[in-house]
Amino acid sequence: MKAIGINGSPRKKWNTAILLENALKGAGVQGAKTELLHLYDFNYKGCISCFTCKKKAGKSYGKCAVKDGLTPVLKKVNEADVIILGSPIYFGSVTGEMRSFMERLFFPLMTYTDPPGSLLSRKVQTAFIYTMGATKEMAVERDFDKQIAANEMLMKRILGASETLCSYDTYQFEDYSKVYAPRFDPEKKAKVRAEVFPIDCEKAFELGTRLVRSLGRKSVKSL
Ligand SMILES: Cc1cc2nc3c(=O)[nH]c(=O)nc-3n(C[C@H](O)[C@H](O)[C@H](O)COP(=O)(O)O)c2cc1C
C-alpha cells in the first residue's frame, strides 16, 4: 500500500508541506509506505492539448503522452493507493504548478462522455489540503470555498473519493518585522500559529489515518 503526498508549494518546510507530512505520518502508522514529492523540484508544463490520451485504441489512451519532468511523478501517483494533494491558495486558487499537475493527472483519466466518466479502474482514496493567509470568513467572502468545492467535486468524479482540509490564517513570513505587510497583525498570526496550526496538523494526521483505513485493507509496508 502506497500513500503519496504532492506539495504544490514552492516551500518544502512550510505550512502546506508540514500538513502533508502529518497526513503521510497518519497513513504510515496505518501501514502505508509513504512518499512526499515537491512539484517545484520538477520541470514540466500543464496539458498541451495534444489529445493523444483520447485517441481511440491509441497506446497512450487514458495516459498523458507528454514526456517531461512530471512523467515519473504521474507514474508514481497512478500507482498509489492514497493520493494527498496540498497547495497554498495563490490569488484565490491553487498554485500554477499544482494547476498544471492537475491538468496532466486528471485530463487523461476523464472521458468525454455525457455525463463525464473516469478511466480509473482501481480504488483509491484521496484528499486535498489547502493553506491560505485568509481567515475562514475571508475565504468564504472571496469565494475561495467555491474553488475548493469544485476541486473536490472534480476529484470525486475522476478519482472516486476525496476529502478536503483547509488551514486558514497561516503564518507566512519567517519574521514579520522585516516585511512591509501592515494588514497583518504579527501577534495574532503568532497566536494562530501556536494554537490553531497544531490542531490542523492533528486533523491532517487523522485524515491520513482515515484514508488508509477506508481503503479497507491494512497492509504491510512493502510495495
Ligand atoms: C503569490 C502569492 C499569492 C497568495 N495569494 C493568496 C490569496 O489569494 N489568498 C490567501 O488567503 N492567501 C494567499 N497567499 C498566502 C498563502 O496562501 C499562504 O501564506 C500559504 O499558507 C502559503 O503556503 P506555504 O507556507 O506552504 O508556502 C498568497 C501567497 C503568495 C506567495
Image: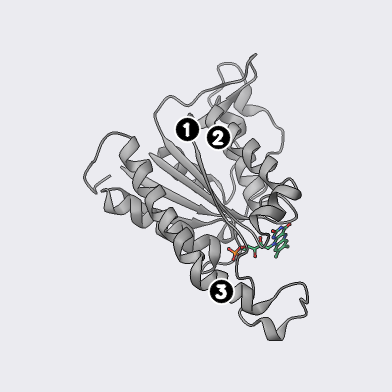
Q: CA distance from mark 2 to mark 3?
A: 33 Å
Q: Is residue 178 above or below residue 5?
A: below
Q: Residue at x 50, y 65 (%)?
A: 197
Quadrant position of the N terminus in the picture: top left
Quadrant position of the C terminus in the picture: top left
Residue 22, position as x, y percentages in the image: 41, 59
Residue 143, position as x, y percentages in the image: 74, 45
What's the amino acid at mark 1? Answer: Ala
Q: Residue at x 68, y 39 (%)?
A: 47
| Number of the label disc, if any, that sits on residue 161 | 1
Are discs 1 and 3 less than 8 Å apart at CB?
A: no
- Disc number lying in front (1 or 3): 3
- Disc number lying in front (2 or 3): 3
Q: Residue at x 35, y 57 (%)?
A: 25
- Ligand 1 position by quadrant: bottom right
| Number of the label disc, if any, that sits on residue 79 | none
What's the amino acid at mark 3? Answer: Lys
Residue position marked by numbered label 3 in the rendering: 191
Residue 157, position as x, y percentages in the image: 55, 27
What's the amino acid at mark 2? Answer: Met
Look at the numbered disc 1 and give the secondary structure of its residue: loop
Q: Residues within 10 Å of mark 1 (few under 14, many from 20)?
A: some
